[in-house]
Structures are given as C-alpha cells and as structure tokens.
C-alpha cells in the first residue's frame, strides 16, 4: 500500500490547476501545477461511447500529455456513473466502410499510445467500465474504482471476440486462468470482485479520493529516474506492443471482415435494441 500523504498529490487544487488544452471537445486535459500530473477526462454524453471522434480526441490528448512532459496521466470520466460504455456499437452496426476503417485504426492508435505511454498512467474508474472501457483502464498501470460499478471484457455476450491486444491488456493485470474464464464468460466484475481478483488495485469512495489515490501511485515514482522507469515499462510491454505494430493491417482486415458478417450484424442489432428497450423502462 502506498504510504505518502495523499493531500500533497491530490490533483484538484483548482487555484493552481492549469488547463493545458480543451481544444478537443470530447476530452479535457488539466495539469496540476503542483504535482505536474495531467488529468485526462472523457466527456461524451450519454455514456462515453468510444466513437471515432472521442477516440481521436483521446489520442490527441495522450500525445499532448507526452509532449508536455507531464509527471503522469490519470484517465477518468465526467459522467458520475459511467467511465466508458466501451466502443460505440453504432460505429460497428451497419457501418460506413471508410469510417469503420478510420474508427478501428484510431482505436489501435489509442491503445498503442496508452499502453505504451512513457509517463506513469492510472485510471480513476468512477463508473461502469465494460469492454472498450475496460481496455482503457487495463492499459493503465494502476486502477482505482468506485464501489457498486462493474468492469470487464463482455464481448462474448455481444457475439463478438475481443482482439488479441484487448486480451494482452487484460492478461497484464489478471492471472491467466482468471482472464481466460472471464473472457470466455464475458464476465463483468463488480468493484469488490475486481479488487479480489486484482483487476483493480484499490477502491475509493468518491471520485476525488480515486484521483488522489491515482496521484499517490504516480507520486510513488518521484525518487525513481524517469528515463530508467519509462524504458523499464516499455521493455516489459514491448512484446504486446510490437505484436500489434507488426500486425496492424491484418488486425484491421480481420475486424472489418468479422464486423460485416451477417450473424455479427444481427447480434449487434439485437444487443442495441435490448439496450434501448432497457433505457426506456
Ligand atoms: C475481430 C474483432 C471484432 C470485434 C471486436 C469489437 C470489440 C468491441 C468492444 C466493445 O467495447 S463493444 C461495446 C460493449 N459495451 C457494452 O456492452 C455496454 C453496453 N451498455 C451498457 O451496459 C449500459 O449502457 C451502461 C452500463 C454502460 C450504462 O447504463 P445506463 O446508465 O443505464 O445507460 P443506458 O443503458 O440507459 O444507456 C444510455 C444510452 O446509451 C446507449 N448506449 C449504451 N452503451 C452503448 C454503446 N456501447 N454503444 C452505443 N450506444 C450505447 C443506450 O442504448 C442508450 O441509448 P438511448 O438512445 O436509448 O438513450
């Protein structure tokens, strides 16, 4: 457990916090002038569905944070109950060919940037985090989650298959046996189950506390040489990163082929319909 005082690292000192950029509409980046930590917030109502525009903004924001040599990156959401609902299913249902390509390519970019980020990363998971939301959270090095939400890779429940690199992130956090069973079941873990299984590192009772715990984790590297730390991280993650780098085109082709299968389209249509029915009740 981290022991240094939380208060010195809390990235909420609004008087000193500097908005680095809000040029991107669906994400905001706020740098704390005291800690040097950047908080990257997703803001796409109603559920932070990862569509092409949100992914593009996420990618630009991560790049901006890297370029500005922030001390760390905390990923969170402006929605009080949803971290991210994962990929926007409307991008995959009856898709436009060119947009589908750009969508998947940008998702690949975001994963490579976040999983391979040179700065320490943490996720303040302040709401539900299915599928692509779980991918983002498990791409970070540390996860703090609020109670009574769910997280997991539920792709099999939608009749789709999580790509290899989704599994890599999941496997970097969970023991293989737990990951394999959860992936096959499309299991969503409650906050308590996620903590017990190691899918998250800590539980916090409020978003502020989650941000503070993430900042404390990032602060734990303050006495470590930053170059040695980032090269160590990147070396540990190199195999998974180069696997996708080397197979990006095939991964895209596979995705496009799979999404366009009539059975997959039918399954996505039914899933969307059920979501809409549920939201109307
Ligand atoms: C070869 C590889 C091939 C394929 C790999 C593809 C990989 C995909 C990974 C993914 O990320 S797929 C997406 C998986 N996501 C989900 O299954 C989440 C579904 N959503 C929910 O479970 C819930 O919405 C929630 C727990 C996130 C939030 O619940 P609640 O607060 O009760 O909100 P509502 O359910 O009422 O939703 C409000 C509104 O938003 C629409 N919506 C929700 N999630 C999505 C989504 N992922 N994509 C598009 N739209 C979504 C929902 O239908 C409602 O719309 P209305 O128009 O009825 O308001």
Image: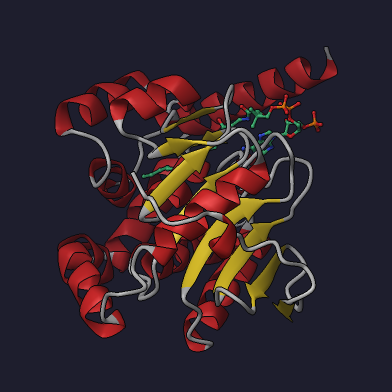
Q: Quadrant of residue 114?
A: bottom left
Residue 207 placement, left or right of 97: right
Q: Is residue 85 left or right of residue 184?
A: right
Q: Quadrant of ligand 1?
A: top right
Nearest the eye: 128 or 55: 128
Quadrant for the N terminus in the image: top left
Q: Is residue 34 visible?
A: yes
Tell me the quarter of the image containing the C terminus: top right
Residue placed at 50% from the left, 87% from the top?
67
Total numbered labels placed on residues in the image: 0
| Residue 138 at x, y percent in the picture | 38, 47
- Say which residue appears at 16% left-offset and 64% top-offset: 236
Image location (x, y in percent) of residue 46: 78, 41
79 w.r.t. 251: above or below:
above
Q: Is residue 87 visible?
A: no
Position of 36 relative to 126 (above/below): below
Residue lying at the far right in this picture: please name it: 280
Q: Where is residue 276 shown, x and y percent of the image?
A: 76, 23
The colour mode here is secondary structure
Residue beneath the point at 38% across and 71% down: 117
Residue 56 percent location from the top left of the image: 60, 69
């Amino acid at each position: 457990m981290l022991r240094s005082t939380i208060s010195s690292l809390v990235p909420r000192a609004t008087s000193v916090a500097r908005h680095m950029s809000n040029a991107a509409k669906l994400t905001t980046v706020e740098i704390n002038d005291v800690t040097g930590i950047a908080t990257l917030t997703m803001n796409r109502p109603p559920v932070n569905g990862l569509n092409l525009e949100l992914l593009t903004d996420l990618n630009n924001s991560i790049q901006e944070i890297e370029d500005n040599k922030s001390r760390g990156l905390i990923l969170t959401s402006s929605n009080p109950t949803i971290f991210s609902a994962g990929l926007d299913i409307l991008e995959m249902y009856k898709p436009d060919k060119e947009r589908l390509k750009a969508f998947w390519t940008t998702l690949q970019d975001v994963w490579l940037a976040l999983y391979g980020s040179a700065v320490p990363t943490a996720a303040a998971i302040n709401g539900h985090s299915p599928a692509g939301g779980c991918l983002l959270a498990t791409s970070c090095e540390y996860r703090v989650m609020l109670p009574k939400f769910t997280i997991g890779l539920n792709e099999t429940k939608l009749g789709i298959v999580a790509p290899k690199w989704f599994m890599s992130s999941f496997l970097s956090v969970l023991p293989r046996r737990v990951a394999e069973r959860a992936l096959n079941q499309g299991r969503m873990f409650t906050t308590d189950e996620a903590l017990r299984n190691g899918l998250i590192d800590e539980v916090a009772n409020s978003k502020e506390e989650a941000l503070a715990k993430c900042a404390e984790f990032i602060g734990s590297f303050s006495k470590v040489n930053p170059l040695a730390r980032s090269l160590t991280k990147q070396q540990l993650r190199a195999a998974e990163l180069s696997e996708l780098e080397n197979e990006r085109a095939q991964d895209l082709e596979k995705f496009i082929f799979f999404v366009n299968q009539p059975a997959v389209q039918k399954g996505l249509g039914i899933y969307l319909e059920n979501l809409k029915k549920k939201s109307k009740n």
